[in-house]
Amino acid sequence: MNASWARLDEEALRAPHGSASSPRENRRSSDSFLRKILKSTWVLVNVLVLIAMPLIIWDMYKHDMETHYVAWFVAGVFVLLAVPITFYEVAQHLEHYHMPRLQRYVIRILWMVPIYAVDCWLALRFKEQTIYFDTIRECYEAYVIYNFYNYCTVYLQEFTTTGLESIVSRKPQQQHLGPLRFLLPEMPKMGEPFLRLCRHGIINYVVVRPIISAAEVICDANGVLGDGQILNPLVAFPYLTLVNNASQAWAMYCLILFYRATHEELAPIRPFAKFCTVKAVVFLSFWQGQSIMLLVKWGVIPVPENGNVAKGTKPDAADYDAADVATGMQEFLICVEMFFAAIAHAYAFPTSEYEKRSSHDDDDDDDDSYLGLRGGRERSSSTPRRVSMFENVKDMFDLRDVYLDVINYGERNRENVFEGLKGAAGMFVGGSGGGSGGGGKAHQDGDVELEEKKKKTAAAAAAGEDLGVRVLQGLQSIDGGPKKSGGGGAGHPGTEMNIDTLIPGVSPVVSPTTPVRAPPGGLPPLEREASSKFR
């Protein structure tokens, strides 16, 4: 009996503060119930729309509606289904904004779905302005890759016990994948050099993608873009595509290298699901567009005859040439795929990873128990929890971190770019016989100059060390040395030394003509010997 009462008392002490039916808990239970009803209703609506969609499409074709009208309608329905899913997930993250340093990047990634979906529908509907809408989507694509990399690095830096650089330093030396190990330079040393390679490889796409997009807009305005003409060497499209593909492939490759090296430490945040959703939307959508372009080029996908009617007329199938068909199919498929991408993102980036493990810990500001992310090394790095929704939205759109990373990337690579330009210029300025030799000679002269500086530095350090020994011995003779009358005072000019003789080739602090007199007790043996030698 006593044991039972003791057990009950212990359970009462463990119970949350206040009664079991406190207003806070009632409010949380009510919110949870309403959310379940909202989710269930939305799922039911989606299922009904998906069931009715084939019937609607069949009825539209039955009434002889043009294909592009059907595409506009179907794509718009999927956009209307996908966008609310993302809005709900973003609102949930903003409400449970307990880890801003991580959730900031999660929300930026989640915005990919509505931006892609709305952008592609507008590009599908207004095909004359497609290039401008595609520019926005493609720039955000590079932004998403950058944010996913930052999400992983911030977790390793702030929510692990050792920190990012320490984790990577202990990893075995990485090698390039497959045949690339024979084509690329040796992988940098694990630690800061490896992290710099990954980060700069990803930021390169953040810089290159907007430049390529701006170049496409300029070329299109001047009629030299040739959109879709991948095999035409007289237009800009194949060259811009080549540069963009190389930059994007290198960014994704660096992301894969980073994931392969740190996937064990990233396990608590389920990195594989997150990595697959990001890579599928970014990488597969790109290759999907390239595949459609080739299928149209080879005639597998038919193109309407007699395209390019006068502007201002009502759009019909005759308005679409081969490039328009390829672009339109790509935009339509992305609109449909964003519905499934929204569901995948809700699964890969759930709010539950940042919610508390128990409902009665709201009054405990020091609680650190979050699903998936507990055990953090520096929980205090996050901003206070009790912040208004407006402040959370402001933090979500704060892009200063991107600006600083791009500036840092430019400063670190400025010297490399200038050296490369100097070498390329030397190949042409130096003439046919000594073009490359001029660049090589400049490089050799730089190496010789660097070696000479190293030698001078070492000599100065050795001389400074010798001077320190001499000064120390002189001080010792002042404090406890024998005091002989007339030993080295003003009446003994033979003990004067010139300070520039102590360190030849190094400018003294005082004037070279300033005499340094020996202490009253006379010079120690080592100094007398040195003085006689210098004289």
Image (spheres, helix red, strand yellow):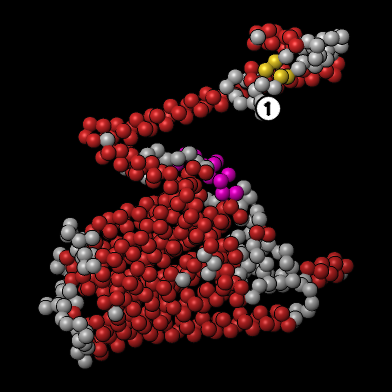
Q: Examine the image and state in which quarter residue 503 appears.
A: top right
Please give the residue where the numbered disc 1 appears in the rendered image. 510
Farthest residue to the bottom: give it.
63
Q: Is residue 211 above or below residue 176?
A: below
Quadrant containing the C terminus in the rendered view: top right
Quadrant containing the N terminus in the rendered view: bottom right
Q: Residue at x 49, y 47 (%)?
A: 195
Name the residue nearer the viewer: 524 or 354: 524
Would residue 195 be visible to someone looking at this image? yes
Q: Tell me the amino acid under the disc marked 1.
A: Val
Would residue 255 be visible to someone looking at this image? no
In the displayed structure image, the side of residue 407 where residue 380 appears, left or right: right
In the displayed structure image, the side of residue 83 where residue 303 appears, left or right: left
Instruction: Read off the magenta span.
Output: 163-175
Residue 86 spot, x, y in % from top left = 47, 75
Q: Examine the image and state in which quarter residue 279 appears.
A: bottom left
Q: Residue at x 81, y 14 (%)?
A: 489
Q: Residue at x 60, y 82 (%)?
A: 33
In the displayed structure image, the side of residue 229 where residue 55 appears, left or right: right
